[in-house]
């Protein structure tokens, strides 16, 4: 079946503008994650959605960042008043079961959105 | 303190030879999972292999195997018979069983270059 998809693949914006990044998880996956990868670095956790539960926003770097997940499927990450330090690749992942499960429950990643803030 | 440490920023290996990518981790959680992902230059993260903290045997997936040494808190990835297509960045990651989220904690990555 289809993997995780993200759009746009690339986004260039001016400092101070708002941006929306979209993630379409694998069908049937209940858990969805957003990560950020700065140039040459590992991935940094941002936010986690599990089914219809309230999301865990503990990784969001500031209140300019928000995310929602509609109908337990598609998610949108919004960055308001973008800053140059927001430039990074934003990766979305989904997994079948999420928190509280044993075993692998592998996270499968999308291709990412490369955000450049000028 | 870093929870996942990958000490090799870059590695070279000759085609058809084996290579070991190092990963050490730090956790007080008795239940955890360790993952390796491959990130080619195209940017996607590709899942390679998983090891659970209670697994008795080292995980293997085709040419990939995980050398899991629990007492030393290491989970090194071994790639046998390297191929040119193995050139990529490799990330070790951990998920703690008692975490409030299912989040993965990533290391800084190792860039592997396979020489023909």
Image (spheres, coloured by chain):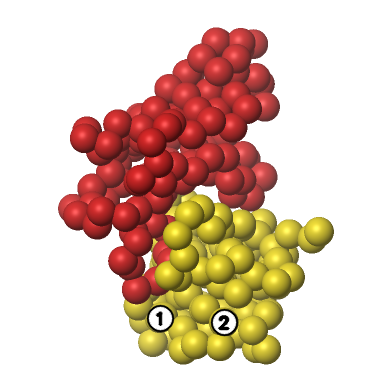
Chain colours: A yellow, B red
To the question of a shared chain for discs 1 and 2, the answer is yes
Viewer can see residue B8: yes
Q: Residue at x 47, y 18 (%)?
A: B19
Q: Is residue A101 left or right of residue B38?
A: left
Local secondary structure at mark 2: loop
B108 over A9 or under it: above or below: above
Hey, which quadrant is residue A97 in on the image?
bottom right
The N terminus of chain A: image quadrant: bottom right
Q: Residue at x 63, y 80 (%)?
A: A75
Please tell me which residue lies in front, A75 or B67: B67
Task: Name the chain letter of the residue that bears numbered label 2.
Answer: A
Closest to the camera, between mark 1 and mark 2, is 2
Q: Position of residue B108 (x, y in %)?
A: 38, 45
Number of dots carrying numbers: 2
Q: Residue at x 40, y 50 (%)?
A: B33
Q: Earlier in the sequence, mark 1 or mark 2?
A: 2
| Residue A14 in view here | no
Residue at (68, 80) in percent of width and height: A73
| Residue position for label 2 | A51
Residue ID for mark 1: A57
- Of A112 and B21, nearer the camera is B21
Direction front: furthest residue: B56
Q: Chain of mark 1?
A: A
Residue A95 percent across, percent down from the top left: 58, 64
Q: Tell me where residue B50 appears, x and y as whole percent.
A: 49, 43
């Amino acid at each position: 079946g289809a993997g995780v998809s993200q759009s746009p693949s690339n986004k260039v914006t001016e400092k101070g503008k708002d941006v929306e990044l979209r993630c379409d998880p694998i069908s049937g996956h209940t858990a969805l994650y957003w990560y950020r990868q700065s140039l040459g670095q590992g991935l940094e956790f941002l936010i986690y959605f599990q089914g219809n539960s309230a999301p865990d926003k503990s990784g969001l770097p500031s209140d300019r960042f928000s995310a929602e997940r509609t109908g337990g499927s598609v998610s949108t990450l919004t960055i308001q008043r973008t800053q140059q330090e927001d430039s990074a690749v934003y990766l979305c992942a989904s997994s079948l079961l999420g928190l509280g499960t044993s075993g692998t429950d592998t996270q499968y990643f999308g291709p990412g959105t490369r955000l450049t803030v000028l | 303190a870093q929870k996942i440490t990958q000490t090799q920023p870059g590695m070279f290996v000759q085609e058809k030879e084996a290579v070991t990518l190092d990963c050490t981790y730090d956790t007080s959680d008795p239940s955890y999972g360790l993952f390796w992902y491959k990130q080619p230059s195209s940017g996607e993260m590709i899942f390679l292999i998983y090891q659970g903290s209670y697994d008795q045997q080292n995980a293997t997936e085709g040419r990939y195997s995980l050398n899991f040494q629990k007492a030393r808190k290491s989970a090194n990835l071994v790639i046998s018979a390297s191929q040119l297509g193995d050139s990529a960045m490799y990330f070790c990651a951990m998920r703690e069983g008692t975490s409030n989220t299912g989040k993965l904690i990533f290391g800084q990555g190792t860039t592997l270059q396979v020489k023909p």
